[in-house]
Amino acid sequence: PYVNTKDILEKASEGFYAVPALNINNLEFLQAIIEAGLEESAPVIIETSEGAIKYAGNGNIMRGAKLFVDMVREYADTIDIPVALHLDHGKHFEYIIAAIKAGYSSVMIDASEHNFEENLSITKKVVEIAHSVNVSVEAELGRLVGIEDNVVVAAHEAALVDPDEAVEFVEKTGVDFLAPAIGTSHGAFKFKGEARLDFDRLKKVKERTGIPLVLHGASSVPQDIVELAEKFGADFKGAKGVPSEILKETVKYGINKVNTDTDLRMAFIAGLREFLAGNPTEFDPRKYFKVPKEYVKGLIKERMRLLGCSNKA
Ligand SMILES: O=C(COP(=O)(O)O)N(O)CCCOP(=O)(O)O
Ligand SMILES: [Zn+2]
């Protein structure tokens, strides 16, 4: 069934596990995600960024949002695992309102580049609107910056979440789940040196707010996938993600939604490059997208098990 993201995440928070939030831009990634959820009997959170909505709607925001709601609802209403659709990194009202109008389960208002007061007032406004039509809301405190080479430069320190602000922020905005910046960053090149996240801040935010928490920039960038893609012509030199054991630690300290996009992209491109190299005569997308989808599905199933949401549907 199609559910509210908040329902999935409150169960995860109570059960001390996490659910991957999986980004889509097209049909194939959605298919891989749904199949993985069914095979793992796990709850599924699908999310689309503003860029994905623009891409699917060819620039028409309402069309893009409606396309994703229709695709996801058609699947969700015909299977027995809970499925939610979330707007990821909503920064502009036209996307946030379009997502709410189209029928998204939840929206993120990402006002983290503003100062605390402005982030708070913008988030409060979105929560009032979204809650009036039973849509749940995610917000972000602090900014996504890698903790470079173990030296947490003062500037980065300032970018990380301030646990003292988190309580006031959650109380005054009524936000349903929160993304505290603890040292991750988007993409495949997250750390130059050793991967390090600020668990101390994470623990404090969880203790003080008690609400479901979100980790952005959480992809692991598995080396075997990187090597497979490079074997068939990719150049991902220096790619490094969040090691699995560190990801597991974040769940222990209160993370319940784990944003995962880069890993899906890496699995897909590795599978696609491998298949195309071995099948020069193939030109049917239903054939040449099959192996990439299998790689994406396999990675998602592993991640569901790592995060503890398998058999939690
Ligand atoms: O936190 C993440 C993904 O983190 P990852 O890169 O570690 O997978 N996300 O919110 C996904 C952001 C995708 O945005 P866009 O479609 O504009 O590229
Ligand atoms: Zn993100």
Image (spheres, grey):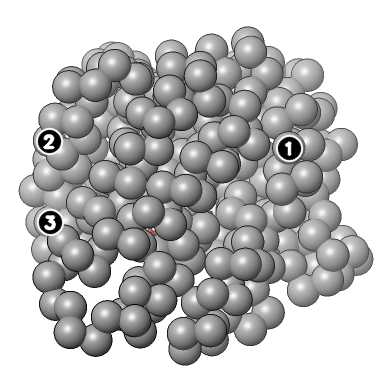
- Distance from Cα at disc 3 to Cα at disc 2: 13 Å
Question: Is residue 308 placed above or below 98 in the rendered structure?
Answer: above
- Distance from Cα at disc 1 to Cα at disc 3: 36 Å
Ligand 1 within 8 A of label 3's CB?
Answer: no
Label disc, if present, on residue 248 of the rendered structure: 1
Along the polypeptide, which appears first: circle 1 or circle 2?
2
Q: Quadrant of the C terminus?
A: top left
Along the polypeptide, which appears first: circle 3 or circle 2?
3
- Residue 198 falls left or right of residue 36: right
Q: Amino acid at mark 1?
A: Lys
Q: Amino acid at mark 3?
A: Gly
**Residue drawn at x 76%, y 19% as measured from the top left:** 208
**Residue drawn at x 51%, y 19% as measured from the top left:** 311
Q: Determine which residue is flagged by label 3.
A: 57
Question: Is residue 153 placed above or below 294 in the rendered structure?
Answer: below
Q: Determine which residue is flagged by label 2.
A: 70
- Residue 80 falls left or right of residue 297: left
Q: Quadrant of residue 246?
A: top right
Decide if residue 310 is in sight here: yes
Please tell me how crowded label 2 is: few (under 14), some (14-19), or many (20+) other residues with Cα within 10 Å: some
Q: Quadrant of the N terminus?
A: top left
Q: Amino acid at mark 2?
A: Asp
Observer-nearest residue: 40 or 262? 40
**Residue drawn at x 71%, y 26% as measured from the top left:** 254
Along the polypeptide, which appears first: circle 1 or circle 3?
3
| Badge 3 element | loop
Q: Where residue 210 sits: x, y (%)?
A: 68, 15
Q: Quadrant of residue 288?
A: bottom left
Question: Is residue 94 placed above or below 293 in the rendered structure?
Answer: above
Q: Where residue 127 sits: x, y (%)?
A: 40, 24
Which of the two marks, 1 or 3, is nearer to us in this view? 1
- Distance from Cα at disc 1 to Cα at disc 2: 33 Å
